[in-house]
Image (cartoon, rainbow, N blue to C red):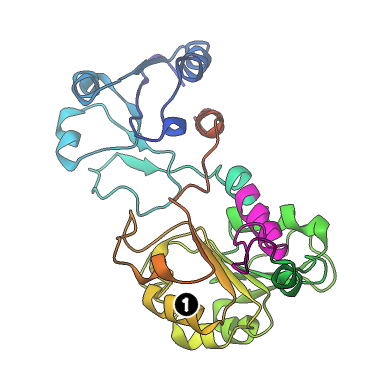
């Protein structure tokens, strides 16, 4: 970094943890100043557009195609978002787009916590009256010895597996390309290809998806694959909503296979009131919140600083 750099932060959102506090920004700014780099924060779009002509690096949730013409010095547009589908712009030559990769620390806790809670009936309570001990007894299980298949075994999926591993499950990491087994793998754990998904589903107790969006993941989990699952299995999706045929999942849940679902992402967000998932039994719907944490932007700023 040097004094030719100028960083402009414009992070406006209706979710409080996605908006920097004064303390968070000042810490970021002071670290940059120690490297002889100036940084400004914009609290409105008008202020951002006024600062844009002097910016070489922008940190933002929002960037429009026409704004590139206002930023002759720009070399990078960064966002805390993980999905590479987030920016819908085509940057001019010499300008790169960058994304966050820190989310596993938060989402891994969320997903691991959801698996543990599902196993003991804490997320989707039984409906058998005010004292449903028999139904709780039918549902309850230990994580030890269960098979947790993680569909999308990248950084977030691996962190989730690492958080779960001390409880003793068998981890199956599923990805499109082969990766070395992580150092925390134990005998019985395995990595697999998406081409093996049908076989894996038949023995899975908890299927946790972190799949990205894209044509290759669209509708990957459909009625045929739901029918392959155990009656006692659960589906959890924290990746992107396009991988699930939502109508087929709602129908499968009504039939009782799989036993339930925890869904944080959907094809359309917010989830329409008309969605069949809203009335599906044993289905917990979350508002795309698996990465919520007060230190979300602290993690992002630290990662951004480590890369620049």
Q: Tell whether position 114 is magenta.
A: yes
User: Looking at the image, can residue 277 be seen?
Assistant: yes
127 w.r.t. 54: above or below: below
Q: Position of residue 55 (x, y in %)?
A: 29, 23
Above or below for 154 versus 198: above
Q: Is residue 105 left or right of residue 245?
A: right
Provide the residue designation for mark 1: 221
Q: Image quadrant of residue 295?
A: top right
Q: Is residue 117 above or below residue 302?
A: below
Query: Seen from this angle, which residue lies furthest front?
Result: 130
What crowding class fits label 1: few (fewer than 14 Cα within 10 Å), some (14-19), or many (20 or more)?
many
Tell me the residue at 51%/84% (across/down): 255
Q: Is residue 280 left or right of residue 295?
A: left
* Residue 18 at x, y percent in the picture: 43, 33
Q: Position of residue 12 (x, y in %)?
A: 33, 30
Q: Residue 194 sits in which quadrant?
A: bottom right
Looking at this view, is 164 or 139 the one in front? 139
Residue at 69% across, 72% down: 135
Q: Is 270 contained in the magenta span? A: no
Quadrant in which residue 246 is drawn: bottom left
**SS category of the residue bearing label 1:** loop
Q: Is residue 240 left or right of residue 50?
A: right
Residue 220 appears anywhere in the view:
no
Q: Is residue 100 left or right of residue 124?
A: left
Range of residues picked out in magenta? 109-131
Q: Measuring from the top left, give residue 201's x and y in whole percent.
A: 61, 81
């Amino acid at each position: 970094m040097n004094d030719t750099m100028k960083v402009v932060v414009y992070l406006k959102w209706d979710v409080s943890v996605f908006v920097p506090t004064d303390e968070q920004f000042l810490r970021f700014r002071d670290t940059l100043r120690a490297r002889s780099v100036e940084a400004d924060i914009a609290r409105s779009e008008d202020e951002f557009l006024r600062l844009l002509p002097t910016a070489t690096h922008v940190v933002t949730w929002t960037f429009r195609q026409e704004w590139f013409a206002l930023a002759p010095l720009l070399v990078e547009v960064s966002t805390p978002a993980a999905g590479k589908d987030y920016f819908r712009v085509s940057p001019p030559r010499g300008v790169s787009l960058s994304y966050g990769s820190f989310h596993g620390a938060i989402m891994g806790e969320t997903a691991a916590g959801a698996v543990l809670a599902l196993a003991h009936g804490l997320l989707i309570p039984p409906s058998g009256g005010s004292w449903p001990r028999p139904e709780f007894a039918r549902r309850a299980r230990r994580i030890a010895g269960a098979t947790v298949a993680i569909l999308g075994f990248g950084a977030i999926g691996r962190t989730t597996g690492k958080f779960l591993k001390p409880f003793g499950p068998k981890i199956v990491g599923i990805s499109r390309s082969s990766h070395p087994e992580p150092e925390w793998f134990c005998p019985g754990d395995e990595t697999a290809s998406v081409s093996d998904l049908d076989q894996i589903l038949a023995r899975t107790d908890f299927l946790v998806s972190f799949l990205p969006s894209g044509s290759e993941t669209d509708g990957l989990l459909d009625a045929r694959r739901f029918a392959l699952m155990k009656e006692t299995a659960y589906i959890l999706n924290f990746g992107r909503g396009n991988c699930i045929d939502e109508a087929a999942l709602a129908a499968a849940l009504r039939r009782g296979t799989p036993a339930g679902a925890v869904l944080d992402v959907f094809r359309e967000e917010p989830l329409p009131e008309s969605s069949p998932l809203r009335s599906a039994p044993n289905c917990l719907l979350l508002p795309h919140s698996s990465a919520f944490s007060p230190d979300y932007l602290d993690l992002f700023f630290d990662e951004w600083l480590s890369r620049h």
